[in-house]
Amino acid sequence: MHSKLIVPELEAVEINGMNRGSFLLKSTLAVGAVYGAAAVGPFVQRAMAQDAMGDIDILNFALTLEFLEADFYKKGLASNLSAEAKELAQLFGEHESAHVEALTGTISDLGGKPVAEPTFKFPFTDEASFLELAQTLEDTGVGAYNGAAPMIESKEVLGAAGSIVQIEARHAAAIRLLRKEMPAPGAFDEALSKQAVLDAVKPLIAA
Amino acid sequence: MTHPEEKVQEQPALRELADDPASRKKFLKLMGGGIAGASAFSLFLAACGGDDDEAAGTTANTAPAETEAMAADGDLKIVNYALTLEYIEADFYAKVIESGLFSGASLETIKVIGDHEQQHVDALLGTAKKLGEPAAKPETTFPLESADAVLELAATVENLGAAAYLGQAGAIKDKAILAAAIAIHSVEARHASALNILTGKSPTPDGAFAAPLSMEQVLPKVKPFIVS
C-alpha cells in the first residue's frame, strides 16, 4: 500500500505500507511543533525518508553493521585495554557475535543470501580512541536500526530488530557512562538514513 | 565491575537462545510470540475499559478487512498505555528531585532523565489527543526511602519501560507512531543500562537479545505506584 504524504518536508516521499500517513504523520510533527520541531522532527522525518528496502535488504544491512561491531570488539580485546573496558568489550563483543548469528540465520530462513563479512580497519590507537569509536559505532547502530524499523514489513523481523536495537542502545549508554558522557544524548534517539550510516562506516571498511 | 549476565526467569527460551547460538532459529518465532500475545492485549483492553475486542486479533494476522478506524483505535490504546507509563516515570523523577535525596552530579543526571520522560509525556499526549481521548494522568506514590533504594527503583522502572515498548512494536499500525515509539524505546534502554550499571547490575540483563514484556506483564508491576 503506497500513499503520498501531504507534509511539505516529506511531500516527495512515498512510504511503503503507510496508510493514513498524512493525518498521523502531521499529528506527530505537530507534537514536535509544540515541543520544538527539533525534538520530534528528525526521527520521524529520517525514518520516513528512506529508500525502499525489503526486509532481507534491511537484515543484510544490519548484518554488515553487526559484522563490523563484532570485529571491532575483537580487535579491541587484542589491544591494551583496562580491566573495565576489557570487560565491556568482551561482553558486548559476544552480543554482537550473537546478533551476527541471529541475522545470518534469519536471512537464510527467509530465503535470502547473507552478505559476506567485509574486512574492516579501525583507527583507534589507545583505550580513549577505542572507547570514542565504540560510542560512535553503538550510537550509529541505534540510529540505523531506528531508521530502518518503520520500513520492516514482517512483525517478526521488526520484533527481532527491536530486541537487538535495545541491546545496542544499552551498549551505547554503558560506553557513554564510562566516558563520563550523558547515557542518552536526548529524549528521542535519532533515526539515521541508510546513506548517513553508510557514510559513517565506509571509512572503516577496507575491502 | 562485574556484570554476570542475569537471565530473565520468565523467558527460558531467551536464556536458551543466549546460551546456544544454534537455537537462534527459534528467535523469530519467540519474538513473534512475545509481541502478538492476544491475551495480553485483551487484558489491557479490559484494564482501560475498552469494549471493543476486534483489535485483539489484529496482531496475529494481516487482517485485510481491518478498517483504518480500527487500526487507529488500536494505536490509541498503545499510545495511552505508553503515556501512562511515561506519566509514572516523569512523576517518579519529579518526586525524586523534590525528595532532596540527591545532589550534585547525581541530581543533574536525574534531572536530565526526568526531562526526557517529560518530553515523552508531551509527545505521547499530543499524539493521543490527535487520535482520540488521552489517558488520564494517574496519581502516583513511590517509596523514596534512600538514594540507593531510589536508584534501584529507577532501574526497575526503566527496564520495565524498555521491555514494554519492545512488547508493542509489532502491534503499532501507523508508521509515524512506530517511529516515535522506537525513538523513545532506545532512550528508555539507555536509561535502563546506565541505572543498571550505577546499581551494580549488568547493563544487559537479558543478554544479546532484549526480552519484550506484554501489557499483561507490565501493568501489575506498575500498579503499586498508582494511587488512582
Image (tube, helix red, strand yellow):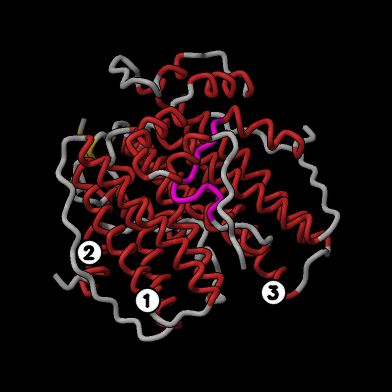
**A92 lies left or right of B97:** left
Residue pictured at 42% horizontal, 40% vertical: B177
Residue under label 2: A198
Quarter holding the C terminus of chain A is bottom left
Q: Residue at x 50, y 62 (%)?
A: A186
The magenta span reads B204-214
The mark found on residue B105 in the picture is 3
Residue B204 visible within the image? yes
State which tag comes first along the sequence, 1 or 2.
1
Amino acid type, residue under disc 3 in the picture: Ala
The secondary structure type at the circle numbered 2 is helix
Subunit that carries the residue with mark 2: A
Circle 3 SS class: helix
Work out how far the residue at label 1 is from the one at label 2, CA to CA, in angstroms: 26 Å
The tag on residue A78 is: 1
The kind of residue tagged 1 is Ala
Where B159 sits versus B27, above or below? Answer: below
Task: State the residue in front, B117 or A135.
Answer: A135
